[in-house]
Image: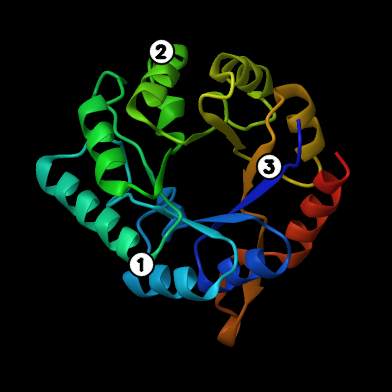
Amino acid sequence: MGRVIREVCADTLNSAITADIYGAERIELCQGLSDDGLTPSPALTKYCCENLKLDVCVLIRPRGGDFCYNEKEYQLIKDDVLFCKEAGAEAVVVGFLSPDGEVEKDRLREIVEISAPMDVVFHRAFDYTADQAKALEELIECGCKRVLTSGGAKSALEGADSLRKLNEQAAGRIEILAGGGVSAENVAEIIRVSGCNQVHFSGKHTITGHRGRKHTETDPEAVKAIKEITDKL
């Protein structure tokens, strides 16, 4: 299997810095996790690309909801991709589906073309495709480097058998990144069953600040725990 790669879903600057310090190889940089992740601000993207040692993969998603974008939204996506390219990001993370759950190949191909030399990752829109085996072949055809997926289940642990099938189908042509509910308690089992050597997690804990106001950030202990476990696999 080789070395396990750890990717942290970082929606704040502090979370990104925590991932960098405590042993993640990559971040998926985003904001707005209450909407399942949105495009981060230009300033946050630029800071992370210029100051962190790990690879910065930037989520490009202009709004919450589905993954069916109109032409104006798609133009925003392209503009954000070009900004990330200029900022020095390692990859952009996108997802395009038609209303019937088909991969929008024309748009995906265009994003792969304009992104180069950045990698393109297809996010968990993949879990909403009508036929995952077919969709995986289409992502490969379009030139995606990697796909983030739970195997279509609520969590990567529940979808571990499906992840194994996708991993076997991929046969090294595209990377399968297991994500969804990954924690120190289940990461070893997810890797064992799925055969995936990459995991995606947020490792959040709650911070109580001024006057009791709360927010969540990536917990250093969560990153350290998953690193310790996966280093032994």
Classify 227 as above or below 134: below
SS at mark 2 in the image: helix
Q: For residue 30, what is the image quadrant? A: bottom left
Sequence-first disc among 3 and 2? 2
Image x and y of residue 111, in percent? 27, 41
Three-letter code for the amino acid on which mark 2 is drawn: Lys
Circle on res. 78? none
Front residue of this view, candidates 10 and 168: 168
Front residue of this view, candidates 170 and 194: 170
Sequence-first disc among 2 and 1? 1
Image x and y of residue 220, in percent? 73, 66
SS at mark 3 in the image: loop
Residue carrying label 2: 134
Viewer-nearest of discs 2 and 1 = 1
Image x and y of residue 162, in percent? 61, 17
Residue carrying label 1: 87
Circle on res. 182? 3
Q: Residue furthest left?
A: 71
